[in-house]
Amino acid sequence: MRIAPPDSAVSEILPAVAEFLNAPRMQIGPAGCAAASGQSFAVYNPATGAELARVPAGGAEDVDRAVRAAQAAFEGPWSQMLPAQRQGLMLRLADLIEQNGEELAQLETLEQGKSIMLSRLIEVQASAEYFRYMAGWATKIEGATLDVSIPIPPGMRYQAYTRKEPVGVVAAITPWNFPLNMAAWKIAPALATGCTVVLKPAEETPLTSIRLAQLALEAGIPEGVVNVVTGLGHEAGAALVAHPGVAKIAFTGSTETGKLIGIQAMKDMKRATLELGGKAPMVMFDDMDLDLLGAAAGIGTFFNSGQTCCSGGRIYVQKGIYDKALEVIAGVTRSLAVGPGMDPANQINPVVSARHQAHVRACIARGIEDGATPLIGASTPAQGFYVAPELFTGVRQDMALMQEEIFGPVVTVTPFDDPDEGIALANDSRYGLGASIWTTDLNKMMRYVPKLRAGVVWVNSHNIPDQNLPFGGVKQSGIGREHGRGALDNYLETKSVCVAYR
Ligand code: ADP
């Protein structure tokens, strides 16, 4: 069934979803399989807290089989394909994602908890578009011809050129906040460049990744090109990162895990891109368009219940509009309907897991203990992993609320006097992923955008990535950029070829 209208509620679970949940298996080479150990682990429905499915607990042996399958495909049929053939298969996969869109959307909301509207629009539709976008690049990979000045031996002339070649097997390790979309962010550029992939999805949300690998086979992508090993981070994930057959690691997740992976990658000289945590500031100047305040809080902060790495959790407001801004942002926070993601009328849905619920609640409790003022204090459904949206004022820069990543529906609103102070507060963080400034003054915008230490700066908007907009962090937010033409280089090696002739 194709994707339902984004804002329609789910009245019944599709039979295909129920059937899939019976026995989801890892995807290695041509077939679904159990873990070599025979072990499995539970995936929970965040809306109820009940077990949703059991998936194989892959370990080193399964990772080894998957990497071997990916190596065989890389050296075999995949490398024989013309770029246009790869492009065609990726476009077919995009179509299949859409054709199975409602099934994927339901699965995503069931395992992740998010609004079915976001599952349809982002996890499904934007992922299909991502494969289409990257499919376009498959036929446009190019090197350069180079003049060189080599003077020996006498009489010899040279011409050089570069070839862009796929790095090989890519280990993709994804987080639980946008499971299907993050898988697309990694798999699509890998396929466009001729690499093969072993994906280790987050243990909380492995289901749509498994389904995506099945659809890749159905699209005609050769077996072994897209493999999915489900398992725990410190087992399957660590084994994958350390596997000698892996050439490149594409990771999105926490800064702590990213550092571990980066160190391991360096030991083996594997290529690595690390998209890590954030603590994004939104800096609102006196002259901003006040009509944008609602969207700033709704999309900038509370999108996906605050579970995005560039969620604008720190709002700094210049004093002239502080009272007005606080009133609007508090109004938005208070108005957000909390409930299961299957009903798109609910804007705050459960967070992904009991563990994460405990983390976000502990951040709120710590804020209160440190002396910040919570303005909302709403309640949540008793069952499921809910956290009510909260807004804090009176937050000092040195408080954990201001410095630590919360990854939940929690925002701080803080006044500042002059623009330089606002930018200094924004930059006072170990993170540097996303940031935004809000102003109608072009001069101010041009002056302050360069001063923000972040990989992405939005002006008069926040938290909106695009496939053609490079995305990644500075400081502790990571290394490398995804999206756009530049992302292809993460998956390509440059080979210089120097040709002598008389
Ligand atoms: P969180 O703490 O929010 O779960 P992580 O950064 O630990 O975030 O998880 C992101 C991804 O990294 C998940 O797929 C997880 O299984 C994986 N992971 C966790 N630890 C490791 C590790 N030591 N090696 C490789 N992958 C890991």
Image (cartoon, rainbow, N blue to C red):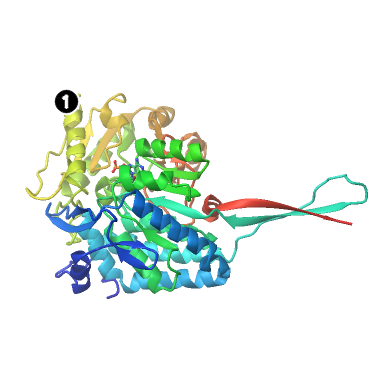
Mark 1, residue position = 369
> Residue 425 lies in what quarter of the image?
top left
Quadrant in the rendering for residue 374 = top left
Residue placed farthest to the left in the image? 382
Nearer to me, 182 or 299: 182
Instruction: Tell me if residue 279 can be seen.
Output: no
Which quadrant would the C terminus be assigned to in this image?
bottom right
On the image, the x and y values in percent for residue 84 come to 56, 71
Q: Residue at x 27, y 62 (%)?
A: 25
Residue count near mark 1 (Cα–Cα under 10 Å), binned few <14, some 14–19, many ≥20: few
Is 301 on the left-hand or right-hand side of 268? left
User: 414 or 95: nearer the eye?
Assistant: 95
Camera-side residue of 400 and 85? 85
Q: Amino acid at mark 1?
A: Glu
Q: Is residue 166 visible?
A: yes
Q: Is residue 279 above or below residue 142?
A: above
Residue 140 drawn at (x, y percent): 60, 63
The location of residue 350, given as percent across then percent down, is 18, 50
Q: Quadrant of the N terminus?
A: bottom left
The residue tagged with tag 1: helix, strand or loop? helix
Q: Quadrant of ligand 1?
A: top left
Q: Horizontally, is 460 left or right of 314 in the view?
A: right
Q: Does 75 sit above or below residue 456?
A: below
| Label 1 beta carbon within 8 A of ligand 1 | no
Is residue 369 toward the left or the right of residue 399 in the image? left
Q: Residue furthest right?
A: 155
Residue 452 screen position, x and y as percent? 46, 35
Q: Is residue 208 above or below residue 357?
A: below
Residue 312 relative to residue 499: left or right: left
